[in-house]
Image (cartoon, rainbow, N blue to C red):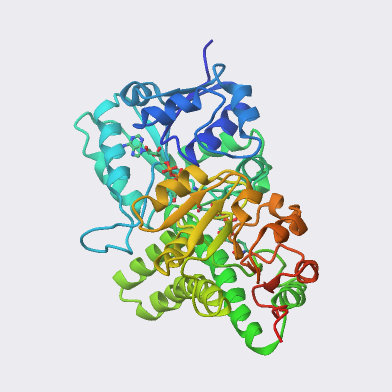
Amino acid sequence: MKFKKNILCIGAGYVGGPTMAVIAAKCPDCKVTVVDINAERIRAWGTDQLPIFEPGLLAVVREARGRNLFFSTDIAAGIREADIIFVSVNTPTKTFGHGAGMASDLQYWEKTAHEIVAHSDRAKIIVEKSTLPVRTAEAMERILQENKKGIPFEVISNPEFLAEGSAVRDLLEPDRVLIGSRQTETGLRAAREIVDIFASWVAAERIITTNLWSAELSKLVANAFLAQRISSINAVSALCEKTGADVGEISFAVGSDSRIGRRFLNASIGFGGSCFKKDILNLVYISRSYGLNEVADYWEAVVRMNEYQQERFVQTIIREMFHTVVGKKIAMLGFAFKADTGDTRESPGIHVARKLLEEQAVLAITDPQALDNARRDLAGLAGAVEFEPDPYRAAADAQALAVVTEWEAFKKLDYEKIFASMRKPAFVFDGRNILDHRKLFEIGFNVFPLGKPSLTHFA
Ligand code: NAD
Ligand code: UGA
């Protein structure tokens, strides 16, 4: 079959895989190929055990796979064939050299730019899907223009706003699709080609076109705003614990103002995930590099508050368990950075586990999807950790439950049965405020919610 367009995506991760599966499902007249250097990932995309857990994803992949959706490790062939190339490689925080711990590590991204130059023999549109520092497109253009073949490339920024756990819904019904381009004739023409892809299923008024720099920067700013809301409510949760106010009631009261809105006001043990911290630190780094120190400090405080909140959770556990957790079994309910994903990148669970192990607690970690990643994250740490798929077995003989992830399944556990199997006094530290605290207290637990009065049986 002759396809209208050949679309390639370099990078078959949490973004590249789902995004391309949805494009393929919605644009059957386009051939969509996803390539990656990670052969194991590519192999898994060809099976029903997809390399990432994402509700609803398998059905979308199955609809298009083998029809107009293909996964391959042949990057050179993919580039040669493509009219449009999405670049969706990882852009983690740099861990070395100048800007370590703050700036984006652009080595994977730059490698793809050179590969595109090496294997192209005709004009192509290159779409930045990865989250990148503002003005990265300029560097991309420079590398691409270095080709000796005189091939014109147009660079577009199309940042992705999907959240893990709801990726398929976010892609099928996005709040908006953002497409930034050079405001030249060729730039605007390239932008229209990308608009046409999304217009197959996204309403025209939800497709926003801007200049390149606005698109790149909007992505960092969107994540910074979302994370800032969480740090704001988490800061308030600490104040609630001192004053007897209830952070849930405050979220509701404050969020009822339609100018503020209800979403992203759930107090937690802190935000995790591969992007919030990385993207804010990137914003901080960029601001400082332009000499905007006050701007940098402002955003950096969002990350500092998040670290404080994670640490506060650990300190509450230690303090309330009589200032020592040595040899005490603590069952961690959840390890993923949020529910409905197996992803543990930057999960607060990592910090909590590490700190509790340092304090010589005995950990039993249970999570419906994230135990393999948890095992990898904690490999090499000294101490006793058990990875237990069954929450009841994880809780047996434990002295405390620590809720790390807001999985629905944890709300439905039989806490009477769990209480009976635990050592006494038994504690619950609910880092997500998902459990019925009053009921747990009545069962016999000493309950420490976040940002709400504790419920204890101690005189
Ligand atoms: P990921 O690590 O899951 O996937 C990136 C993939 O790129 C990996 O499989 C890696 O092997 C591959 N890769 C790296 N270099 C390559 C090369 N030279 N050639 C071919 N493949 C290569 O990362 P992700 O979570 O999908 O994130 C990708 C980008 O999207 C990042 O910039 C991230 O900030 C952004 N983003 C992520 C999310 C999310 O929810 N994870 C959401 C929005 C935006
Ligand atoms: C986030 C953004 O929501 C996406 O729009 C963005 O595309 C993505 O980052 C990215 O750039 O990678 P994601 O990290 O997958 O998506 O998940 P979120 O739902 O945003 O949750 C992030 C963290 O904040 C989680 O740890 C979650 O538990 C926490 N959170 C969220 C709270 O603590 N409280 C809330 O009210 C909401």
Q: Is residue 344 visible?
A: no
The answer to whether 162 is drawn above or below residue 322 in the figure is above
- What is the count of numbered marks? 0
At horizontal 50% and vertical 58% (from top left) the residue drawn is: 363
Q: Quadrant of the C terminus?
A: bottom right
Q: Is residue 238 left or right of residue 126?
A: right
The answer to whether 171 is drawn above or below residue 132 in the figure is above
Residue 322 drawn at (x, y percent): 55, 80
At horizontal 45% and vertical 76% (from top left) the residue drawn is: 301
Residue 223 drawn at (x, y percent): 52, 61
Q: Is residue 72 left or right of residue 151?
A: right
Residue 324 drawn at (x, y percent): 49, 76
At horizontal 43% and vertical 60% (from top left) the residue drawn is: 279
At horizontal 49% and vertical 46% (from top left) the residue drawn is: 158
* Quarter of the render that holds ligand 2: bottom right
Q: Is residue 148 left or right of residue 295?
A: left
- Observer-nearest of 170 and 51: 51
The answer to whether 53 is drawn above or below residue 249 in the figure is above
Q: Quadrant of the N terminus?
A: top right
Residue farthest bottom in this picture: 243
Q: Is residue 13 visible?
A: yes
User: In terms of image quadrants, where is residue 244?
Assistant: bottom right
Residue 33 drawn at (x, y percent): 46, 25
Q: Is residue 429 left or right of residue 315?
A: right
- Observer-nearest of 243 and 55: 243
User: In terms of image quadrants, where is residue 217?
Assistant: bottom left
